[in-house]
Amino acid sequence: MTLRSRHAIRLAVATLLCAAVGPAAVWAAAPAAPQAPVKKPEAPAKKFEVPAVVAQVGDAQVTRDEAYAYLLEQIAEGSHRPAADVMNQVVDELVNRKLVELAAAKVGKSRDEYVQQEIDKVVKPADDAEVQQFYEQNKARMGSTTLDQVRPQIVQYLKQQQSQRAFGALLDRLRAETSVRSFIESARTQIAESDAPAKGPKTAPVTIVEFSDYQCPYCGRAEATVKEIIAHYGDKVRIVFRNYPLSFHQNAQKAAEAAGCAQAQGKFWEMHDLLFANQNALDGASLEKYAADLKLDGAAFKKCLDGGDRAVAVRKDVVEAEGYGVSSTPTFFVNGIMVTGAQPFAEFSRTIDKELQRVPKTK
């Protein structure tokens, strides 16, 4: 995962643009778990107005537009993302806000009232079985704390998770029901596929290049999303896998080489799936066991792995990834548009759907 959270960037950009379009036009209040509407004060503070010219330097002027552009560049630099991507994120937040405002207006409610109403329709209190299951799954981190002691916190946490999913589903539904077009062009990087393993036709309108690490837990989590993308979009997407083993994951390099050795015998994806399914067992003996499970030529596999035959190819992936601005795993490029971290399916689908709109529809 990146060191800076997406939510922190969202708030920073929202703060930046508040002065540009007014506090009501930036919805930084898309909460992880929507809260009940808060009554507004009788006399709200006067909105901060930014003049068209913010400074005079001799005969020259510093304009509001220059100040906004500079602040956007600073946020982009601090988040290690292109300015176009940061602005696209802002546009997405504004679109979400507008979609909810329009839907709320149709039923005569405020935005917050409408969101709460829609959330309440689907969010139900966690039952005892769900609470017990969560406690058992996380018991090792709770020490001597009993279930009864943490039950209220677990119930609240599970409710927040439901609220997050419900809020995301609401936005997806509103987007599906409303024509949405964005006029901000995303920053793109031309990513070479090299001889990397791939799934999907070369003619697919969307190519997703993934840089990943077999020992990275976030990468393991992202694999479920990749499978969901393939299931949903079929031949419209092509998935290309490239390596970016992190130096502090002691088994990641050899695991990447093992996948390459399996690729030489036509079993890359099978090995790929085994490695992600067994992230806590990537030592040499385990890698050889997986090769045996896949009925690979054991001697050839061992010679390839022990001899470092694939080390150069893995290093090539790493060098090229760093040239593309990759610094964490997983990192994806959707038609050259960077998506970092183990993002949910909805995050990918927005970008993929935009890309599909860019290409002529085929029969």
Image: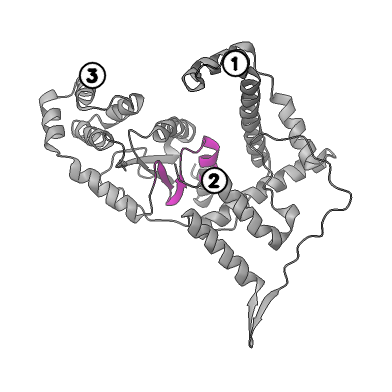
From the top left corner, tell me how far across and down residue 179 is, in percent: 66, 47
- How many discs appear? 3
From the top left corner, tell me how far across and down residue 307 is, in percent: 11, 36
Which secondary structure, mark 2?
helix
The residues bearing labels 1 and 2 have C-alpha atoms spaced at a distance of 29 Å
The residues bearing labels 3 and 2 have C-alpha atoms spaced at a distance of 40 Å
Camera-side residue of 123 and 10: 10
For mark 1, what is the residue?
Answer: 131
For residue 202, say whether it is visible. Answer: yes
For mark 2, what is the residue?
Answer: 6
User: Which residue is the extreme one toward the right?
Assistant: 42
Q: Is residue 335 above or below residue 292?
A: below
User: Which residue is the extreme one toward the top?
Assistant: 129
Q: Is residue 313 above or below residue 219?
A: below
Camera-side residue of 129 and 154: 154
Quick one: label 3 or label 1, which is nearer the N terminus? Answer: 1
Mark 3 is surrounded, within 10 Å at the Cα level, by few (under 14), some (14 to 19) or many (20 or more) other residues, namely few
Q: Which residues are magenta?
A: 328-351
Mark 2 is surrounded, within 10 Å at the Cα level, by few (under 14), some (14 to 19) or many (20 or more) other residues, namely some
Camera-side residue of 142 and 86: 142
Q: Judge left or right: residue 229 versus residue 166.
A: left
Which secondary structure, mark 1?
helix
Residue type at mark 3: give it: Asp
Q: Are marks 3 and 2 in contact (CB under 8 Å)?
A: no
Q: Judge left or right: residue 76 versus residue 155.
A: left
Quick one: label 1 or label 2, which is nearer the N terminus? Answer: 2
